[in-house]
Amino acid sequence: MDKLLVNNILKQLEEPHQISYSEGFTYAKECSKLIAEQQYPLARKLTIRVLNHWSEMDANLYPIWSEMMESLGFYPYLRGKEDGLETTSLDNNMRLSYHESSYLPSVILHAGQKEISDLIFSGQNVVLSAPTSYGKSLLIEEVVASHKYHNIVIIQPTLALLDETRIKLLKYADSYRLIVRTTQEFNSEGENIFLLTAERVLEYEKFPQIDFMVIDEFYKISYAREDERVDILNNAFMRIYYDYHPQFYFLGPNIMSISPSFERDFNVKFVMTNYSLVDSVEIKETEPKDTTPTKLKKLCELLASRPLGEQTLVYCSSPDRARTLALIYYEYLTDKRVAPRYSDLPLVEWIKKEIGDKWSMVKELEYGIAIHDGALPKHLGASIIRYFNNHQLDVIFCTATIIEGVNTSAKNVVIFSETKGRKKLDYFDYCNIKGRAGRLMEHYVGRIYTFNGEPVQHELNIDMPFSDQREDLKDEVLVNIPADKVKPQLRERYDRLHQIPSELLSIIKRNGVSINNQLKFAKAVSDYVKSGERDIFWKQMPKWNNLITTITLLGQCKLLQFDGRVRTAKQLCFYLQRYYSLKSIVKFFHSFQGDDEELYDKNLEDAFYIQRQWFQYNVPKALRVGESIINYVYGKSQTQVCSYSYYAQQLETNFLPDNISILLEYGIPAITIRKLEHHIPKDITEEELVPYIKGHQELKKVLLDYESDLIDHNL
């Protein structure tokens, strides 16, 4: 192989140009040599670059390159005569037929997908590390479509990703009941798919026999990534695996190896591959001497120079940075007198009416600009991604949330920030962000523009804490390991943990948070009972003294840990009371905003963050933990118990009626649900709700176009 010649060819194929027969034949000859020498990554790269110039190539070369693609397993691209991409012999057609999915109509698997599919359907547990563009999640749908598994648990790290999966699986709703929250009952007479975060797996009271389990972004199970929810994911896996022993499929990117003990003891086949039908080109945009204003100018010029139809993601270190850069780019376009192109987006009308026209994202959306971060309401984040994928937005300024499996169709990725929050961006996250450039079956070649140096390369080797059981194993995981699976070096610590009274230990394990903090809380409650005070003993809805006493006690024991936006128990209680009285995060925001328009965007972002992180997660979780321990401790001395669950659920569901609040899980805004509430029977059940809405199209008369579109797309 002549490496210099191949590199020259790749360089030639970076720019559009007509490819003569002689030139294209030379490319094919070199690609054939690469395949013969088993230089498959380079052969794939060359072939993808040729595909990117397919319409510019002499058509007489199409059969030769179709053969090349077939030999590399690029079967999804061999779609038919209309573009010259077709198999050319009986043998080739037989191999193409072999790669057709047995369960997904009109879907052809590439060679890598076919290998994994065969492993799964042979009954093998599979852990797959593959590029973003590999199409790993397609295999989840194939498992569902096969109907070989009656009850499936799919664990994903975010509600946004779970909702994206739910929408893909809606076509199977006639066969499977889709369970998306812990209050839903499974179908005991039929098939079920549980779409849950790890936290919800632990909270779900009782599962049927689980036949298959999926864990997406499985690297989060490892201590190597320092994820705050690592213990919960370990415990979620153990709960499902040790109770039901299902087959499982883990998927994620950029992992070099996994724990040998996990492979051995859990009958796992680990597949690490760089196989991809998408390639990328990296371009360095700045010089070491460039100042921040120079970088910002280069960023704006780069974004404005992208051709129409080439969407771009811009990675930013934080929501504040994303918001700032989006505004800078908007002002750049208006200074250049660029006309808005997206003024008729239904989302723009909805924001103006339901949130306010002072939010800078309103005017930015009209210019094809959006932001995406973890604080945005779920429906907004999902709609921004959908508009982007439908070529109704040009640029998204996003945070690290974009790398956790949200599927985008970005031609270009700009890595502008060199940090993730306050920490330096590491090589693993850097590669994940890069992996968003290009999209299988849409963009053959993506572009990656970097504004900083590449982080130091390192291989990510994933430990499995529950399996490895090293000395640094957290008590929260250790306590959940079955007694006969505990390794000798941890037996003494395990036995010490099991000296906790069995009833209390059962509660602590189910709660899934810090054991020490739960024990501190149990001691604090015991002392509180002895004092004769009663403010923590409330049911249903708390008064101020109930709330402040309970929240303070939870905070003192670190079952609630305050942050930059919520600093004290008193501040949190004030927010909770205001939120309860207004029952709307938008009204909550406007009640604090005042006339300071300069802080409008930041204050709105803070309100969204407080709702999502505190009202819908931190507080309900802590209250349920507190309730379980208070009832245990207080039940020892008297019969009266407290009940926080109703209030916790009300916070999670925006104070909507239980039977219609499930629409929140389906990505419908609370504002929209309240409009529908008056037109839906009050005694309707969760299972009857969606068919009722879909069968009564007249309900849409009370909705804005954006809301009607959400109903059609999400239900």
Image (spheres, grey):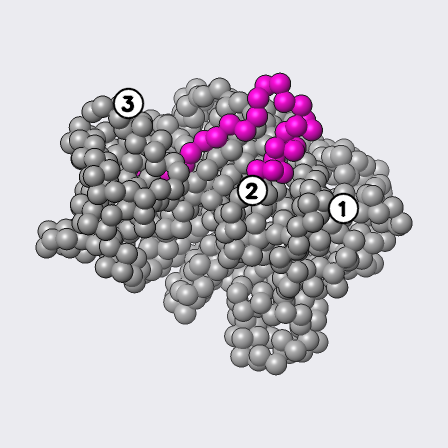
Quarter of the figure with residue 417:
top right
The residue depicted at 32 percent of the width and 50 percent of the height is: 55
CA gap, disc 3 to disc 1? 52 Å
CA gap, disc 2 to disc 1? 27 Å
Few, some or many C-alpha atoms within 10 Å of disc 3 (few <14, some 14-19, many ≥20)? few
In the rendered view of the protein, which quadrant contains the N terminus?
A: top left
Looking at the picture, how far across and down is residue 448, in whole percent? 48, 35
Q: Regarding mark 2 in the picture, which secondary structure is present there?
A: helix
Quarter of the figure with residue 582:
bottom right
Question: Which range is magenta?
Answer: 273-302
Q: Amino acid at mark 1?
A: Asp
Looking at the picture, how far across and down is residue 710, in whole percent? 58, 65
Q: For the view shown, which residue lies furthest in the left direction?
A: 90
255 or 406, which is in the foreground?
A: 406
Residue named by callout 1? 601
Residue named by callout 3? 4
Q: Could you tell which of marks 3 and 1 lies nearer the N-terminus?
A: 3
Q: Regarding mark 1 in the picture, which secondary structure is present there?
A: helix
Q: Regarding mark 3 in the picture, which secondary structure is present there?
A: helix
Q: Could you tell which of marks 3 and 2 lies nearer the N-terminus?
A: 3
672 or 59, which is in the foreground?
A: 59
Residue named by callout 2? 305
Q: Amino acid at mark 2?
A: Ser
Q: Is residue 271 left or right of residue 310?
A: left
Looking at the picture, how far across and down is residue 81, in whole percent? 23, 59
